[in-house]
Amino acid sequence: MSFDRLIDGIIKTQNPTVAGLDPKLDFIPQYIKDEAYSKYGKGLDGAAAALFSFNRELIDALCDIVPAVKPQAAYYEMYGWQGVRALCQTIEYAKQKGMFVITDGKRNDIGTTMEAYAKAHLGSTDIEGEQFEAFGADALTVNGYLGTDGIKPLLNICAEHDKGIFVLVKTSNPSSGELQDRELAGGETIYLTMGNMCEKWGDELLGKYGYSAVGSVVGATYPEQLGELRAALTHTFFLVPGYGAQGGGAKDVAPAFDKNGLGAIINSSRGIMCAYKREGCDEKDFAAAARREAVRMRDEIVSYIGEIKA
Amino acid sequence: MSFDRLIDGIIKTQNPTVAGLDPKLDFIPQYIKDEAYSKYGKGLDGAAAALFSFNRELIDALCDIVPAVKPQAAYYEMYGWQGVRALCQTIEYAKQKGMFVITDGKRNDIGTTMEAYAKAHLGSTDIEGEQFEAFGADALTVNGYLGTDGIKPLLNICAEHDKGIFVLVKTSNPSSGELQDRELAGGETIYLTMGNMCEKWGDELLGKYGYSAVGSVVGATYPEQLGELRAALTHTFFLVPGYGAQGGGAKDVAPAFDKNGLGAIINSSRGIMCAYKREGCDEKDFAAAARREAVRMRDEIVSYIGEIKA
């Protein structure tokens, strides 16, 4: 009922990073695609098979040094229900390999419907008295625009199933400020208001490290706000996208961490998935290149925050 | 590149309503479930088959009098990738029957990822030079918390594929006001700010009826704000949930319409799907009961707004 399992993994690997699994076909080595197309055809079935093969090799190459993966739902939905099946397979495989799985779905809806999303992605679905895990991730990103009753059903499932959520607070994209940076009548920004709501929502779901099951998404591309939010939201764990391809560096993400090097996990997607392209190595070496980049990223970030301790 | 196709359908049927397809197992007659379980087992496959059978009969019963359906993604995801396959089948079947399909997914993300969602739900996916429709809906609900660059990729796809989006502005749930009703420093509420962004986003996607391809979601449970927004957002078509089960009545939704009876489409999900339970009729009569309720709802709303004309 908190992020304890994730933080355990971060401490064990001394690595506060998560590998984003956003497997666009463009990112996948041709030999993997050709193999998948020859078995399943050059369509959605073949593409989906390629996604899962790619992810499986990445997970094998990363699972002992990176504590978590973050599949982005959009890149699976783009390949239809077959792609969504590859998402299920990916989640299952990563969990088997001991990784913490954060489904990046940014789901949101009114209470009764949010309960369905909560069951789908974090809990289980009842079919004639038997429980089935539909996706079974460990955490889900969500959007809090609808307020408390769109979040509440998730909290129940987090408590019951030992899962967590990350609520969008200050996103990494260039126009995130259009709404999120606007000041309310009282002088507080919308992103800080949303952050404070996360603190409140997590109140009864605190874990042994002092962080609750309700985290926030705060972009690496806004280091100042990252520091402001870290200081304000003492029980809220941060998921930090925007490192690498989007422009954030290790120095930019340092303010996300507390004095023990805890409090945040930094995501890299393209940086890790496409390391083989940047290196210019043989595409068959893509998984090893991903591992080299994951090690480089870990070392760079840890050089700013020091040893990670409980 | 607008909601012209939807509005054509509304005028033709003289019915400004959409049937929500949120097929929880609890809502589905037992004989349909038993048939599906006997063929596909009492698990996610069987449940998903039941969802599609249920939807198919509802679509058959409604397609000549109701212009649109709105499947809610959460209720399909709850049944895993098999449920998502049932969503694909439902969309395809409703389109075959001439209905306009609004996928209620409330998707949102940064630009590059939103492009993937746009392709997934409204556009097409390129696989080695060939285009595949992953979901192929006519419109998608989205959440604008991330600002313009999270919306822009959708606008391109709407223009290219003649599709539309509905952005959450003022949602129907009890705590929607927690964030959405807050006043910004200038005195404007967040929901109105979001509404004004919709007006701007739709600027270059105007259709023949004066409404753009960028609509707003505004709940029937807040009739005052519905009227305020109708007056302020002259080019923005409204999708209005909250009628029926959530408490909104025909009088509450009347302010959503313009003087021609255009400008909005009212959703009913449980009201229509579960009409057979409320009526207490034989469960085998569920589709006819849904049609009776759809007719009743249409007549009730039209009695407030009069003839719908171009």
Image: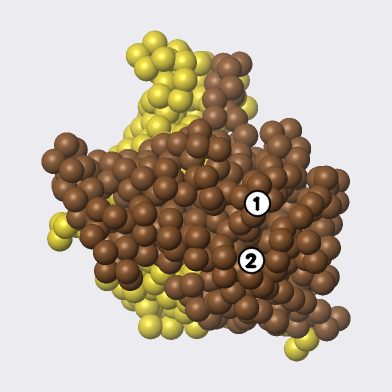
Chain colours: A yellow, B brown
Is the residue marked by circle 2 packed among few (<14), some (14-19), or many (20+) residues within 10 Å?
A: some
**Residue B279 drawn above or below residue B96:** below
Residue at 61 percent of width and 50 percent of height: B13
Eye-nearest disc, 2 or 1: 2
**Residue B134 drawn above or below residue B249:** above
Q: Is residue A92 left or right of residue B209?
A: left
Which residue is disc 1 drawn over? B10
Tags 2 and 1 both on a single chain: yes
C-alpha separation, residue under disc 2 versus residue under disc 1:
11 Å
Pick the front one: A249 or A192: A192
| First in sequence: mark 2 vs mark 1 | 1
Which residue is disc 2 drawn over? B302
Is the residue marked by circle 1 packed among few (<14), some (14-19), or many (20+) residues within 10 Å?
A: many
Tell which subunit mark 1 falls on. B
Residue B112 in view here: no
Q: Quadrant of the N terminus of chain A?
A: bottom left
Q: Position of residue B171 (x, y in %)?
A: 60, 71
Q: How many marks?
A: 2
Q: Position of residue A158 (x, y in %)?
A: 34, 69
Q: Position of residue B257 (x, y in %)?
A: 73, 66
Residue at 49 percent of width and 40 percent of height: B94
Q: Element under label 1?
A: helix
- Badge 2 vs badge 1, beta-carbon distance below 8 Å: no
Q: Element under label 2?
A: helix
Instruction: Indicate the amino acid at tag 2.
Output: Val
Residue at 53 percent of width and 81 percent of height: B174
Tell which subunit mark 2 falls on. B
Q: Is residue B308 left or right of residue A242?
A: right
Pick the front one: B113 or A242: B113
Q: Quadrant of the C terminus of chain A?
A: bottom left
